[in-house]
Amino acid sequence: MSTPLTDPAADPLNRSRRVDVVDALRGFALAGILLLHNVEKYNFMWSPDMQIDLFPSLDGHVWTALFAVFGGKAYAIFSMLFGFSFWVQYERMQAKGYDMGGRFVWRLCLLFSFGLLHSSYYSGDLLIFYSSFGLLLVAMRKAPDWLAFAVSIVLLTVPFHLYELLRLLADPDFAPIPKKLSWPYWGLLGEAQAYASFPELSRAFLTNGLKANVLWTWDAGRMFHIPGLFLLGMLAARRKLFTDMASKRWAILGSVALVAYIPLNYAKSNVWGWCEGSAKLGDAFYAVLSPYEDLAMLLFMVSAFILLWRAGLGRRLFGWLIPYGRMSLTNYMTQGLTGVILYNGCGLGLWHYFGHTLSMITGVFILVLQVLFSRWCLKNFGQGPMEKLWRRLMWIGHKSAAAKSA
């Protein structure tokens, strides 16, 4: 007789239709995003003015360590797995004779509305970009692998930033688009985060916050990086790399990525010294090197994660993140709400008191609560509340049995 842990109908993780390692990897990325957001106090740029000095000597180390491990990498893994999930859904519906291209466009419109809602209380939302760039996945869903891979590689080179760098190297008088255009808007947002009421803060988030977010995403090269990672994730799902690719190949990929990361990291760390006489050249080099470095570390981290998982150690270390990764939309959106309540002036105002170490500890506490909530939701309802709403709205007006059973 099946036990609750082996019966697919009773299993809250529904392993019959999911890849555990992907859910755990998504949970790992989301946990990294949560910790980074907390040490940043959810893009609250002001320093504490009444800091509790419990761990003052640790604050700098905590900031450096978390950004070394997760900065630019956690979001990249999360983005790649968005493309993976798209293809899994598309393939499942294709097997039932239904091309979900148009329906997925509607799904992305819903995600954009969720992103606007999220942007009303957090200035670093990713969902508005995921919903916009996700249209590329729909457009490329029938493209051959070689074409999808070629487009992905072009996007991952961050072509516009690379073009500006090459132009600047050829012509020192060339004037690229200035970097750090987002900084004035972050500055304007700080006053509202510190002292405004929640309605006033929401207006600030939807004006200055959105502008800052879009401009920063452009500066960081993520306007190209995100859709490139989407296609990479789609290809990984098509080729079933997370389940069928040999461990030896993962080891080779991880080793090559690590070898590439070392000189990229060195160059990024020293670029300002090398370009001391030209700030715009330093900005241009940094804008190109940063996403390249993140991509190399992403491939290394994913390879290491897969190899650890297959060896059994990964499941013991990260298996508890499976339900967390399955409820990624709910958990991601509630992270931002938690940030408003904890750090901003309209909430508890902890920005006054918390340095990086206390903020990180707070993030760990939130992570534990979210993991427990995820397990409870999946056990009792099979989905998180936002996932369920998204799915129901996606199929609104469609009565096919195939859609209902998706």
Image (cartoon, grey):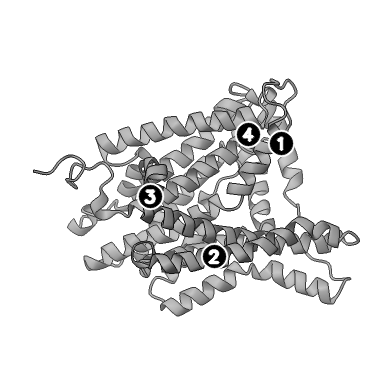
SS at mark 4? loop
User: What's the residue at 31%, 42% (across, down)?
Assistant: 383
Q: Give the camera-side residue of 177 and 254.
A: 254
- Mark toward the viewer: 3 or 1: 1
Q: Quadrant of residue 27?
A: top left
Q: Which residue is mark 4?
A: 41
Q: Amino acid at mark 1?
A: Gly
Within the image, what quadrant is residue 276 found in? bottom right
Image coordinates for residue 295, horizontal then vertical, percent: 58, 61
Disc nearer the start of the sequence (3/2): 3
- Disc 2 residue type? Ser
Read off the residue under disc 1: 60
Q: Nearer the viewer, mark 3 or mark 4?
A: 3
Q: CA distance from mark 2 to mark 1?
A: 30 Å
Q: Which mark is residue 255?
A: 2
- Mark number displayed over residue 23: 3
In the image, 401: left or right of 232? left
In the displayed orientation, state which residue is furthest to the right.
Answer: 277
Q: Nearer the viewer, mark 3 or mark 2?
A: 2
